[in-house]
Image (tube, coloured by chain):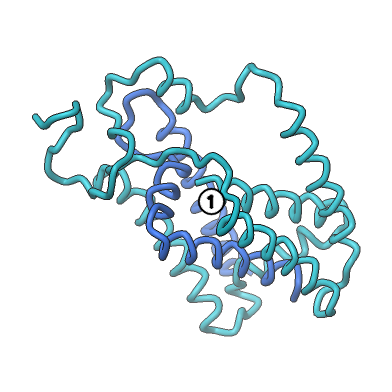
Amino acid sequence: MAANGVSRSPGRLSGGPGRPVADGKDSKEERAARQWWPSSRPPSRQRLALSLVLFGYAWLAATTRPFTFMSLLVVLLPGAVVAGVAIWGPPDRIEAPDRLDIAGFSWWLVIIAVLFEWEAAGFRDNSPWWHPSLTELVDPIIAPYPLRAIAFFLWLITGWALVRR
Amino acid sequence: MATRVITIIGFCTVIAALVILEIVARRPGSRVPALGEWLGYLMRPKTGRVLLLAGWLWLGWHYFAR
């Protein structure tokens, strides 16, 4: 055992200071943070306002046509905002674990590697009809305007979620 | 036709596996880190942070600008 209640068992990737890895004896707060159902607390006004702004932006951005300057601009603008927030005004960051269980994390690595290989195989063959790339399959799904707006909104909130970590 | 269907099934299987893994990760006492946890771990160093945010931007460019 190690000091500060942090497990130092082998097979764990280690980083800098952070919260201890879960050892099956999670506190009430840790269990609440790991729950997979939505929180019962109502979202704050700030969060609702931010969501509305982002959805409004997504709704407008979805009107742009691909391969145009405007479509590039509506993507670069949130990128610049996220970069600015990350550099100059990061919000309260969600504390990351100081260690990851290698065995547990390897499941993610394997599945993501399979996804990349499947996509790369289609891309290598120039996305033929018999082995389309993921892009070829997703593009028709997000082609309708409402779905495109929703997809753009999901992309925006993903960026916000990333900058908070 | 069959090969195209197999490709689509393959993608759907992988995406379903990711969703199931996230559900498993959120169970109490799970050894599998949740998506937010390992993303946060990777984003702790500046390099990881820059790379992941750049990847997010690239996804947006790939699906919405081109």
Q: Secondary structure at mark 1?
A: helix
Identify which amino acid the numbered label 1 is placed on. Ile
Q: Quadrant of the N terminus of chain A?
A: top left
Horizontal and vertical percent for residue A75? 74, 66
Q: Which residue is outermost to the left?
A: A1
Residue drawn at x 58%, y 73% as measured from the top left = A131
Left or right, residue A22 beside residue A42: left
Horizontal and vertical percent for residue A80? 68, 65
> Toward which corner of the image does residue A41 lie, by quadrant?
top right
Choose between A127 and B36: the one closer to the eye. Answer: B36
Choose between A57 and B1: the one closer to the eye. Answer: A57
Left or right, residue A140 beside residue A108: right
> Toward which corner of the image does residue A139 lie, by quadrant?
bottom right
**What colour is chain A?**
cyan
Left or right, residue A73 beside residue B16: right
Horizontal and vertical percent for residue A130? 61, 75
Horizontal and vertical percent for residue A47? 72, 34
Identify the residue under disc 1.
B15
Please determine whether, in this image, residue A40 is positioned above or below residue A8.
Answer: above
Instruction: Tell me the chain of label 1.
Output: B
User: Disc count in the image?
Assistant: 1
Choose between A45 and A123: the one closer to the eye. Answer: A45
- How packed is label 1: few (under 14 Cα within 10 Å), some, or many (20 or more)? some
Residue drawn at x 70%, y 53% as measured from the top left = A156
Colour blue, chain: B
Residue drawn at x 70%, y 25% as measured from the top left = A43
Residue drawn at x 47%, y 26% as measured from the top left = A33
